[in-house]
């Protein structure tokens, strides 16, 4: 079992693992409220990668990965996850409005 | 989570419809506030045995896959099967409303996009813990 320190690496390898063997790969979230610790694990029973955190700021990252896996597991391994993984970047940017006249 | 042989007298694994699953998942988080852990597992599943899948493949039948969601607190395991992305998200989103669920996740999201916007408004507290 390997704990990855880079979130981006964890996400990338997770998706690769799943797409390589969708039937055997599972995504596990373990939460301990008393310790405030969250551990994410992705494994196909051959390879296992994990990411752990106790930081609230990582919650948004977990949400993103949840979105990705929900999309993949409900729609299939070939599902397009760009709208799920990339859309938060779009929404984080302020909406561009047309130029208004200054009065 | 163990996947050993089931014991007829002890119901340790329960398959539920999505709505009862939501209720029980929330209860599970609430029971685990003082001690213990809650595990939530997502799996791409056809809900058929390997033998059945092989037979279907041989016969050229299409195998339908859904999202299998399991949750356990170490004592009881519950599960549900859904093929709707939005509903699968809703399951986790509904459980978020439990006070025992990680409160760092937005409190009342209905969709992943609502949650992202909510987090953006709140801003990030560097180094803050759960």
Image (cartoon, coloured by chain):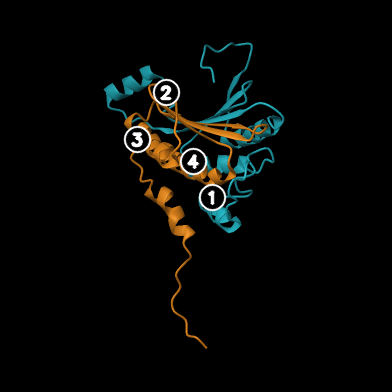
Chain colours: A orange, B cyan
Q: Residue furthest bottom?
A: A103
Q: Position of residue B50 (x, y in %)?
A: 38, 19
Disc 4: host chain: A
Q: Residues within 10 Å of mark 1 (few under 14, many from 20)?
A: some
Task: First in sequence, mark 1 or 2: give its number.
Answer: 2
The quadrant holding residue A36 is top right
Answer yes or no: do the residues labelled 3 and 2 have beta carbons within 8 Å? no
The quadrant holding residue A74 is top left
Instruction: Name the residue that disc number 4 marks.
Output: A66
Label 3 in the same subunit as label 4:
yes
Instruction: Name the residue that disc number 2 marks.
Output: B48
Q: Position of residue B76 (x, y in %)?
A: 63, 22
- At mark 2, the secondary structure is loop
The residue at the point 53 percent across, 52 percent down is: B116
Q: Residues within 10 Å of mark 4 (few under 14, many from 20)?
A: many
Q: Residue furthest front?
A: B127
Q: Which mark is residue B111?
A: 1
Distance from Cα at disc 2 to Cα at disc 4: 24 Å
Q: Nearer the viewer, residue B108 or B35?
A: B35
Label 2 in the same subunit as label 4:
no
Task: First in sequence, mark 3 or 4: give its number.
Answer: 3
Distance from Cα at disc 3 to Cα at disc 1: 25 Å
Instruction: Name the residue that disc number 3 marks.
Output: A16
Disc 3: host chain: A
């Amino acid at each position: 079992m390997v704990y990855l320190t880079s979130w981006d690496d964890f996400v990338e390898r997770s998706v690769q693992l799943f797409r390589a063997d969708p039937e055997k790969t599972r995504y596990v979230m373990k939460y301990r409220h008393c310790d405030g610790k969250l551990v994410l694990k992705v494994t196909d029973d051959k390879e296992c990668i994990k990411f752990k955190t106790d930081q609230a700021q990582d919650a948004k990252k977990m949400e993103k990965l949840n979105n990705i896996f929900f999309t993949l597991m409900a729609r299939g391994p070939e599902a397009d996850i760009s709208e799920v993984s990339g859309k938060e970047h779009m929404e984080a940017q302020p909406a561009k409005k047309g130029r208004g006249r200054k009065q | 989570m163990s996947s050993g042989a089931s014991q007829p007298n002890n119901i340790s694994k329960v398959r539920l419809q999505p709505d009862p699953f939501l209720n029980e998942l929330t209860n599970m988080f609430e029971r685990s506030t003082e001690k213990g852990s809650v595990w939530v597992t997502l799996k791409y599943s056809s809900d058929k045995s390997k033998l059945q899948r092989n037979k279907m493949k041989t016969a050229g039948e299409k195998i339908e896959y859904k999202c299998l969601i399991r949750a356990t607190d170490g004592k009881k395991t519950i599960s549900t099967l859904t093929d709707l992305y939005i509903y699968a998200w809703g399951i986790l989103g509904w459980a978020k409303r439990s006070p025992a669920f990680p409160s760092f996740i937005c409190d009342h999201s209905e969709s992943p996009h609502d949650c992202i916007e909510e987090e953006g408004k709140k801003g990030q507290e560097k180094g803050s813990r759960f």
